[in-house]
Amino acid sequence: MRTFQRRLEQEGLTYQRLVDQVRFQAAAELLGNRSVKMIEIALELGYSDAAHFTRAFRRWTGVEPSEFRRLCLKGSGTAFLTDSGHAEGHQDPGH
């Protein structure tokens, strides 16, 4: 475990930040599918309810998941993401 923590540290990451980044990427993909309900996304990502997921997503991107979904389905949702998959103009997931 210590080796893993050291390697994360070398990459400028923490375990929580890594988890948040993976969750964000999965959420962005799931939000692109209109048939997947918000509660299903929340549970899939390990949140106990949609409200906790919504707060985390808003922290990562600055917008509600429903707004992100609307923009994704219009084709502009990827404007929130940088090349590294982080939310543009907002805190990186995990901060």
Image: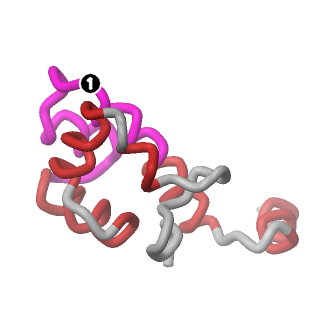
Q: Which residues are magenta?
A: 25-49
Q: Is residue 26 left or right of residue 5?
A: left
Q: Is residue 6 left or right of residue 85?
A: right
The image quarter containing residue 16 is bottom right
Q: Which residue is mark 1?
A: 33
Q: Is 50 placed above or below 30 here?
A: below
Say which quadrant the N terminus sits in.
bottom right
The residue positioned 78% from the left and 65% from the top of the image is 8
Q: Is 93 placed above or below 44 here?
A: below
Q: Does residue 50 show up magenta in the picture?
A: no
Q: Is residue 52 left or right of residue 32?
A: left
Q: Residue type at mark 1: give it.
A: Asn
Tell me how many marks there are. Answer: 1
The residue positioned 31% from the left and 30% from the top of the image is 32
The residue positioned 70% from the left and 70% from the top of the image is 13
The image quarter containing residue 73 is top left
- Residue 42 position within the rendered picture, expressed as x and y whole percent measured from the top left: 23, 45
Q: Circle 1 — which element?
A: loop
Q: Residues within 10 Å of mark 1 (few under 14, many from 20)?
A: few
The residue positioned 18% from the left and 51% from the top of the image is 67
**Camera-nearest residue between 32 and 47:** 32
Instruction: Identify the image's colour scheme: rainbow, by chain, secondary structure or one colour.
Output: secondary structure
The image quarter containing residue 64 is bottom left
- Residue 92 position within the rendered picture, expressed as x and y whole percent measured from the top left: 53, 70
